[in-house]
Image (cartoon, rainbow, N blue to C red):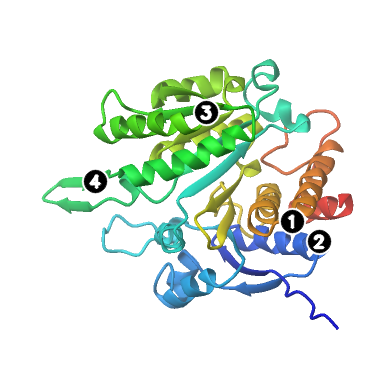
Amino acid sequence: MAEAAPHPRIVVLPGDGIGPEIVAAARELLDALGDFDYIERPIGGASIDELGTPLADDVLEECRSVDAVLLGAVGGPKWDSTDPAAARPEQGLLGLRKGLGLYANLRPVKPLPALIDSSPLRRERIEGTDLLVVRELTGGVYFGRKERKDGIAMDECVYSTGEIDRIARIAFESARGRSGRLTSVDKANVLETSRLWREVVTGVAADFEDVELDHLLVDNAAMQLVSDPVRFDVIVTENMFGDILSDEAAMLTGSLGMLPSASLGEGGPGVFEPVHGSAPDIAGTGAANPLATFLSVALMLRHGLEMEAEAERVEAAVEAALGVGLRTADLHTGAAGETRVGTAEMTEAVLDAL
């Protein structure tokens, strides 16, 4: 008799604020789809409180040994400090990305039909938007040398040819599988790292003659995202620019609470998390929107576990729940046909739609 295939193994990192609530809802969703083995461990502020560090070495080792990592959110005013020596929750997230070699962050932005009118932008401006932000995740100013002394602060921004080449290839491959258009965003009129970025991306384009490449300065890209988002297919950019632009792009969907992400590397497990923060102001109230986490689960099923059919079921179920007018507080506009619900009610609706 053939031995049964092992269940996919997932490290679950609930984190801080609303993280535990949305991750608990995501586990309900996963349990409705199949059998998974979970290892739940702390990260961020919760880990500082419990273990004295935002990311313990043994937690990172466990993350390396599984099939995928599902993350909630980190951070909160409890751990805010201007002391450069103080442990910060965000260091756990950066350490996880660096420790797992997750250099590519994928953030799809596609306003769902039911939420078109939830965006602060006019319907006619965003209809048809379907873009993917590919953000370099382990280089740049976030990981450069930092120093503060005698009233002067310094953050070093460093990129190598190899780091730019590998993220560019992820972006070109992504564009090749979509509409064949890639926009590389930089600040090449000012920054030397951006001039190298543009040079390397242009060189990689020679291997992807079927993909149309253009370059935009980051300030122009920020304007174009809200004035003409339909023009974009895939956007590739460095770490800090990608952080800012993808949060801006989230508003095209109506709420930061709708944007999922996948952080991928070479060979090891990916990390899948909603883009929104820990929202400590609503933690424990049952009001958190779980949908970005559910859509992150879909990315985990697709990119981390090779379960495409299940990923499509999750995405369809989210759209169905929104289609009958259910809205968490961040999505609620007061329009006719909308029903304001909390985390539990939205989760139940998505599970019913499965």
**Residue 334 seen by the camera:** no
How many C-alpha atoms fall within 10 Å of the one at disc 1: few (<14), some, or many (≥20)? Answer: some
User: What's the residue type where badge 1 is placed?
Assistant: Met
Quadrant assignment for the N terminus:
bottom right
For the residues marked 4 and 1, what is the alpha-carbon distance in whole angstroms? 40 Å
Give the residue at mark 4. Answer: 156
Q: Which mark is residue 307?
A: 1
For the residues marked 4 and 3, what is the alpha-carbon distance in whole angstroms? 28 Å
Q: Which comes sooner in the sequence, label 2 or label 3?
A: 2
User: What's the residue type where badge 4 is placed?
Assistant: Glu
User: What's the residue type where badge 3 is placed?
Assistant: Leu
Q: Which comes sooner in the sequence, label 2 or label 4?
A: 2
Seen as rendered, the residue at the extreme bottom is: 1
Q: Secondary structure at mark 2?
A: helix
User: What's the residue type where badge 2 is placed?
Assistant: Leu
For the residues marked 2 and 4, what is the alpha-carbon distance in whole angstroms? 45 Å
Give the residue at mark 3. Answer: 182
